[in-house]
Image (tube, rainbow, N blue to C red):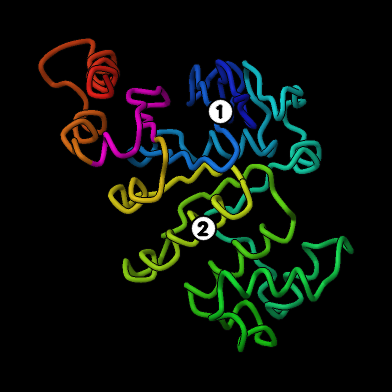
Amino acid sequence: MNAVLRCRDLDAGYAKGRPCVRGLDIDVHRGEILALLGPNGAGKTTGLVTLAGLLPGLGGTVEVDGKLLPPGRARAACRAGLVLVPDNRALFTTLTAEENLRLATRGRGKWTSERDTVLDYFPGLANRLKVAAGALSGGEQQMLAIGRALVQHPRILLIDELSMGLAPVIVERLLPVIRQVADDTGTAVIIVEQHVGLALGIADTAMVLRHGVTVLRDDARTLAAAPELIEHAYLGDHRGSGGDSAATTSSAEASG
C-alpha cells in the first residue's frame, strides 16, 4: 500500500544552512497514526510546520499521494489535504465556536452536515456553539481546533501538542477521538505529544527525534511494551558515542 504522505531526507530550520531537523524520513498510510515523540527542542514542531508548508524545507522532499509538494507553500499543502492543528490552536477568540467552524468550511459542502460531524466526535461542544472561542475552556478550545481541521476534510492531519495546557484527564478523553477519526475516515495522522504512554496507546507507529535526528522508529505496541527503548532514545547513550545508532538498532531488533 502506497503512503499518503511520504517525506524523504527532509532538512528543516529557521536559518538557511542551519537545519534543526536533519534527514527526516516519514511514511504515513491511510488511517494510520504516527506518534512523533521526543524531548523539548528535538525539532518536532519544526518538522510539522515544514510539512504543512508554513516553513520552507532546507532540503529533501514531501509528497502527498505521490505528488511532490513545493516547499514553503502552505496553500499548496492545504489543497493537497495537509491540515495542521497548531499547539496554540490559533482560534479567532472573539468569534463564536460556530463561526470558527463556518470559516474553515470555506463554503464547501452542507454546513449542517459538517457541524453535526464535529458534534458527533465532540458532543461537549453542542451547547457551546454560540459562545466566543476565547471564553471556552482549554479542553473545549482544543475540541474546536480539531473540529475546525476536520471540516476541511484532511487527508493528513497534523496535530501539534494536543495536550498543551490541558489536564491529563482531558487528554485521556481527546486522544481516543483521534483514533476514531482515523478509523472512521481513513485520515492519516501525525501527532506530536508529550504524554508518551497515551500517545502510544492510540498510535500505530512511533518515532523519536532527538537534536533533530530520528533515533528510534518502531511499532507503537512494541514501544509501549518496552519503555526502556523510549527512555534510551530520549536520554541518549551515556556510555560513549553512537547513541543514536544504538537506539535505532535496538528498535529494529525488538520488532523482529
Determine the CA span between mark 2 and mark 1. Answer: 33 Å
Please state if 223 lies on the left or on the right of 127 as rendered.
Answer: left
Disc 2 vs disc 1: which is toward the camera?
2
Please state if 256 lies on the left or on the right of 140 as rendered.
Answer: left
SS label for mark 1: loop
> Residue 138, relative to residue 52: is it above or below?
below
Q: Main secondary structure of the magenta part?
A: strand
> Residue 98 appears in which quarter of the rendering?
bottom right
What residue type is disc 2 on?
Gln
Question: Which stretch did the figure color magenta?
Answer: 206-224
Q: Is residue 243 magenta?
A: no
* Residue drawn where x is 65% and y is 19% of the image: 61
| Dot 2 crowding, Cα within 10 Å, few <14, some 14–19, many 20+ | some
What residue type is disc 1 on?
Gly
> Can you give x and y, in whole percent of width and height, for residue 124 in the image?
53, 81
* Residue drawn where x is 73% and y is 31% of the image: 72
Q: Badge 2 is on which residue?
A: 180
Viewer-side residue, 128 vs 173: 173
* Residue drawn where x is 41% and y is 60% of the image: 163
Q: Badge 1 is on which residue?
A: 13
> Can you give x and y, in whole percent of width and height, for residue 117 in the image?
67, 69
SS label for mark 2: helix
